[in-house]
Amino acid sequence: MLRYVLKRLLSMIPSLFIVSIIVFLFIHFIPGDPAEILLGDMATPDQVQQLRQEMGLDKPLYIQYWLWLRNAFRGNLGNSIFFHQPVLSVIFSRAETSILLASMTFILILAIGIPVGYISATRYGSKLDQFISSASMAFASIPTFWLGLNLMIFFAVYLKLFPSSGFPSILKEGKLSNLIYLVLPSITLSAPNSALVIRITRASMLDVMKEDYVRTARAKGLPELWVNVKHVFRNSLNAVISTLGFTFATLISGTVVTETVFSLPGIGRLVVDSILRRDYPVIQGIILTIAVVYMIINLFVDILNAWLDPRIRTGAGGSV
Amino acid sequence: MVVIALCAWALSTALYAGGTKETKKTEAKATETAAPKQLRYATIAEPPSLDQQVITSDQATTIAQHVFEGLYTFNSKYDPVPLLVESETIAQDGKVITLNLRQGVKFHNGKEMTSEDVYASLQRWGKFGVRGPVLFNHVNQVKVLSKYSIQIEFKEPFAPWKSLLAFINGGAVIYPKEVVENATKQPIPENQYIGTGPYKFVERNPGRYIMLEKFANYQSRKEDPDGYGGKRVALIDKLYFIPVPDVATRVNGVKAGDYDYAEQISGDLYEMYSKDSTVRTLLNEGVIMPLMFFNSKEGIFKNNFKLRQAILACLDMDAALQTAVGPQNLWASNGSIMPKSTSWYTIDGTDLYNKKNPSLAKSLAAEAGYKGEKITFMVSSAYKIHADIGMVFSKTLRDAGFNIDLQVYDWATLVSKRGDSKQWDMFFTHHGFIPDPILFTFMSEAYPGWWNTPEKAKLTEEFTVTMDPKKRLEVWKKIQSLIYQQIPIVKVGDVYNFDVYTPRLKGLGTTQLIWPKFWGCSLE
């Protein structure tokens, strides 16, 4: 297992290198210039050119990339053109929101998605199953901006139970109660994602229920709960874990609409704002960070799946 | 929804319970000393920097005007009035200006402001400032006469000097000499945001807020407040400027009590919030002027004034403004390049404005030799007003027989493309309020559009050297007539924003000036 993990970690290096080149080229090929954006309408072409020189944007692309790569290897991702701060500190300042929001949402998804999916599968065909299927379909279809705004109007404006928007830093203020700012956003995000997990859990369990070994377990007279938990649920977890892993990575790397609606200083808004401002160092740094997060989460999911299913560890065939 | 409501209630109870101990401690402290009054202002976007000399972002100016001050500012009629200057003397028919500074004005670092600081600030602004060269191209030299006296010597009389020194956006704010003497085009760093204003810069938390704090040693002017001029008293202890990009969130935040003031609310919400007792609405006097630029340097419109007139004759400004803005009290189809509220208002030359006449447009186009060539029209999706008016204009022009190729870009792309004269024929933008017409972007030959005709050069020269305000207005009338004859731009009209705020906030008056200001305001 250790060798497998090391091999996967090493394979991340060329992937990151390729990602960095692609991102660097793409952001420099789209029209727009940070110097023009920064200086505004009244700036003359000479002033823009002067600032481009000060920023090093007049150098050939391969030199700009080389300088960036050399600094990145030393842990320096450069300075944000917009914020005039190191890229790493800009990313860290946003990471707190994204990590906490993703974690709270993920807990809600786990708490709602898996149990409800389990109940729906084990009551297959019943009225409860039909209700859960319809409700999860409805929640999966609700646009997050609509749900978010309505939750805000109901719970923040009318009931005044929660703050409407923003998120003061817990690390800076030392107040754990600031988590209350993330309740409505995490409910907003968990609604469609829980619905997805409900449907995946239900579908995977129904697939496994058709397997011969489940029929055998029942024929042996094992209690229904034992059959469902040990033989059905456990063997259907691979698909659920893969979905959960992808969902968590998506939540961490940014949920632009929800962050915008609730005015959260997260990674998603930072990416979009930085692209609009042509803040090249931040775009480059953040995409690289997101790539690392995706790769690590994928690695974790693969390890978990391998631990749950010996056939993956040993490389044995057969459908799962 | 019931499940969500129950979950929400449980979570809020749990988290509030967690916070109760801290709240009780805070409340106990608050009983010992009065809690500081904090104003939370929801801004539409985050400014790149607060360095007013090199940045023209309105978001930056709204914040920075509380921190930095210039030699002059504007009163409620947008006339320049002294701020850091005590008195002035004008000699040699306006060629030599001597400015006597107020004594005892303190920077936020405790140092007294002197003419050395003013000299260094003006030098940096003149060389690297966004609007500085407009003034400094006419300056022969700047001299320090004494500790509190400085002299500006012009090459020839330059009438708009005071308006330029009073306009803080991209303007000549005064920094301490140590901060500004080595500064360049790059904005000065945050730890050097040292001004003379009633609030001092404390902290920027990217994506979260910019925080200002009342400056205890602020030396205010003594005159009654008038516009941005006169006495400035900071009654609120701390100002937080919080970026909230979504308009619905800004308004809901004020209604929920999370923000005290929210800027730039959509026009279509005006009626609703005017009748809402939980918020107050406030009209912003800082007019926005949507403008369509023609490419005077290259392409189909180069030297073809007749074709530009054909385009103008066709356009329906009322329909465009109604579509883009909404309620009629938030816009005016005004052909005067300067708004009605200013002394520069004139209807000279505006015959073709808002004509809505496709047949006239067709005949003018035929006279101009137009044979259906493609006209590239660039608009940006970043501003709703640009995209909406662009759509209306495109439809109107196509119906009148013009072959319009509408290209919609994000703002950065449009800014980049408009710099290349080969890539476009018309583009859409807007202009904020300016106190003197010389500051219009289209008056600069370097600005995309590149309006540069001998007639314009002659009138501009006359406009800048004429010192008498009445005579200047006459020259401006001639320039406006020339604009409607040569049409470097099409002005669509005047658009006003409105803001909402909590009824707890007092002292704002019935309208706001260009950039909302909070000295003289209090929170109940």
Image (cartoon, helix red, strand yellow):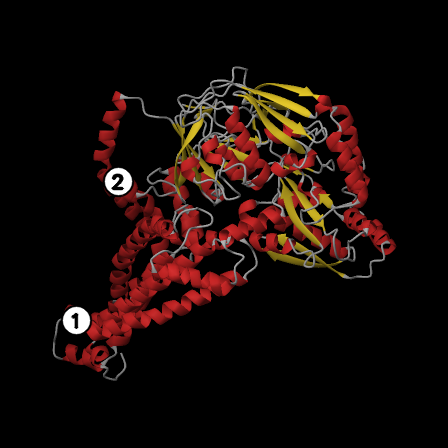
- Indicate left or right for B20 with B154 as reference: left
Q: Which residue is mark 1?
A: A230
- Indicate left or right for B420 with B253 as reference: right
Q: Within the image, what quadrant is residue A294 found in?
A: bottom left
* Residue ID at (23%, 26%): B28
* Residue ID at (49%, 22%): B507
* Residue ID at (78%, 41%): B456
Q: Quadrant of the C terminus of chain B?
A: top left
Residue A179 visible? yes
Hey, what amino acid is under mark 1?
Answer: Lys
Q: Which residue is mark 2?
A: A175
Q: Give whichever of B474, B373 is nearer the camera.
A: B474
Subunit under mark 1: A
Subunit under mark 2: A
Residue A143 visible? no
Residue most extreme to the bottom:
A317
Indicate the secondary structure of the residue bearing disc 2.
Answer: loop
Q: Within the image, what quadrant is residue B355 found in?
A: top right
